[in-house]
Amino acid sequence: MKIVLISTPVMDFVQGELRPIAYDLTRECPPYGLYLLSTILSQNNHEVVLIDLIANSSNEIDKYRKEIEDCSLVGISATSLSWPTATNIISQVRSISKQMKIVVGGVHPSMFPEYILRTFDVNFVLCGEAEITLLQLCNALDKSQPLDNISGLVRCSSRQIIYNSSSCRLTQKDLNKFPPADYEKLPINAYKGLSIESSRGCKYNCIFCSATYRRKWVPLNPIKFVNNIETMLPDLDKTILKLFYVVDDEFSTDPARSISITNELRERNISIKLTYDSRVTDLLYDGFLENMKEFTGQLLVGAECGYDAGLKNIGKGITTNEIIRAAKALSNHGLSTKADFSFIIGFPWEDFNDIKKTLQLAGYIFSEFGVRILIQWYIQMPNSKLWTDYRKKEIVNESMYDNFGYFRNLYLFRSANNLKPSEIWEISRLIQTLKVLSSLAYPKKQMIEHSLPLSIYENYPEESFNVKDIFNKVQ
């Protein structure tokens, strides 16, 4: 059976033209899940055409018309941010074939299968991890077999939504038996590095996080993970920076396991650089940084809040003291210039003074230890506990993610943000001061990253706060 799989870039209109934005503009690494699905289907005697629109920096599929006309199933994968692109691609597929069977999967469709089936012209939604269920669907369609026993499959029949058993959750045994993603057809220099996974899920449950599987973590065996690295090594030359991007929610969830991975790499004389996410407390684990140092290309540390009450509110499970100690540890091991500490500002309960506390901590660990600081504003994202609470109150809903413009959506931004626009501008000016100071110390590298929310920039221009109120003029 011939299947077409399509990746969907995050896009928006920029100066009237639809373009990739955010991380799909910089194209850090390929969509690992889709390349893995393609590998599994191919190894099970299906013919797969993988259309990597992220690599193409486009949403256009017309040049693949022949492949689509000739296939039996089109699979489209999407996150919440790329869902508008997915809906556009669904329409393009339908313009090519009204009868083509379309299955959608990924984080966003998994959350809202019934809404998607009732709203968009698709045949199937696969909920949860699809490595087993997509293969079962393709096998069943190829042999004209019943679809009732495919876990996580949701479909519409005679205007009725039919749910099979609950979404498929893979076990450690499942993950360890999957092959590594095959990057044989990866375009040259389309990405900075190769994506690879060493685990799925997260042990924690931060209220702002939209990760699919929280409170459950399933790791690969260290030897299996290094086997996958070894298999993928020849394809590193197809990338710009020759890095492996570990796509785990938290690579260092079990620091002892991470150390085992480094030991295995040394035994095989494999010299590589990894980009990965790590928790503050993992960085303080005895021996972790010593062993990871030679393999670290870049690491992201989720600090999130600069005051202990905020860290408690979001369920982070760390303290400001531990954030400072982690930054110091990175500096002591010569890794501070490779570390990004992320902070989120504008949580629903935060006022101006709360955010100032976060900026003060961020400024301190930058100036004292030389780590890079990423500051982003909180915006409502499906699947987080915060979003779910607002959904129950009917303040947000899934239809708000069907259209382009997530970062420009004033309603989504302000639905959970209690600051005045003038205060947001004032915070932006404070951060700009930090940026200027950081540029004096690091003239060749941007050490403080922050962008004013587009929705505020477009709807509340700074100039409007410098003009006296017209009513005062009348008086």
Image (tube, grey):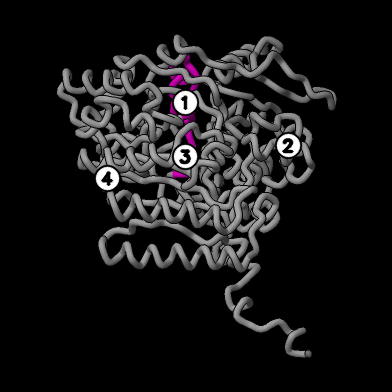
4 and 1 marks in contact (CB < 8 Å)? no
Q: Give the class, few, some or many, for how many residues have Cα within 10 Å of label 3's Cα (few <14, many ≥20).
A: many
Q: Residue at x 55, y 67 (%)?
A: 425
Q: Earlier in the sequence, mark 4 or mark 1?
A: 1
Q: Mark 1 points at which residue?
A: 38
Q: Is residue 104 above or below residue 432?
A: above
Q: Distance between the residues labelled 2 and 4?
A: 49 Å
Helix, strand or loop for disc 1: helix
* Quadrant including the N terminus: top right
Q: Which of marks 3 and 1 is nearer the N terminus?
A: 1
Identify which amino acid the numbered label 1 is placed on.
Ser
Residue 324's image quarter? Answer: top left
Q: In this view, does 362 lie above or below 210?
A: below
Near-viewer residue (227 or 359): 359
Q: In this view, does 198 lie to the left or right of 85?
A: left
Q: Give the class, few, some or many, for how many residues have Cα within 10 Å of label 1's Cα (few <14, many ≥20).
A: many
Q: Is residue 339 left or right of residue 145?
A: left
Q: Which residue is drawn at 30% across and 65% down?
A: 439
Q: Is residue 193 left or right of residue 74?
A: left
Identify which amino acid the numbered label 3 is placed on.
Asp
3 and 2 marks in contact (CB < 8 Å)? no
Q: Mark 4 points at which residue?
A: 336
Q: How far apart are marks 3 and 1 (CA)?
A: 11 Å
Q: Give the class, few, some or many, for how many residues have Cα within 10 Å of label 4's Cα (few <14, many ≥20).
A: many
Q: How far apart are marks 2 and 1 (CA)?
A: 23 Å
Q: Name the residue under label 3.
A: 52
Q: Name the residue under label 2.
A: 121
Q: Which of marks 3 and 2 is nearer the N terminus?
A: 3
Q: How far apart are marks 4 and 3 (CA)?
A: 34 Å
Q: Residue at x 60, y 80 (%)?
A: 466
Mark closer to the observer (4, 1): 4
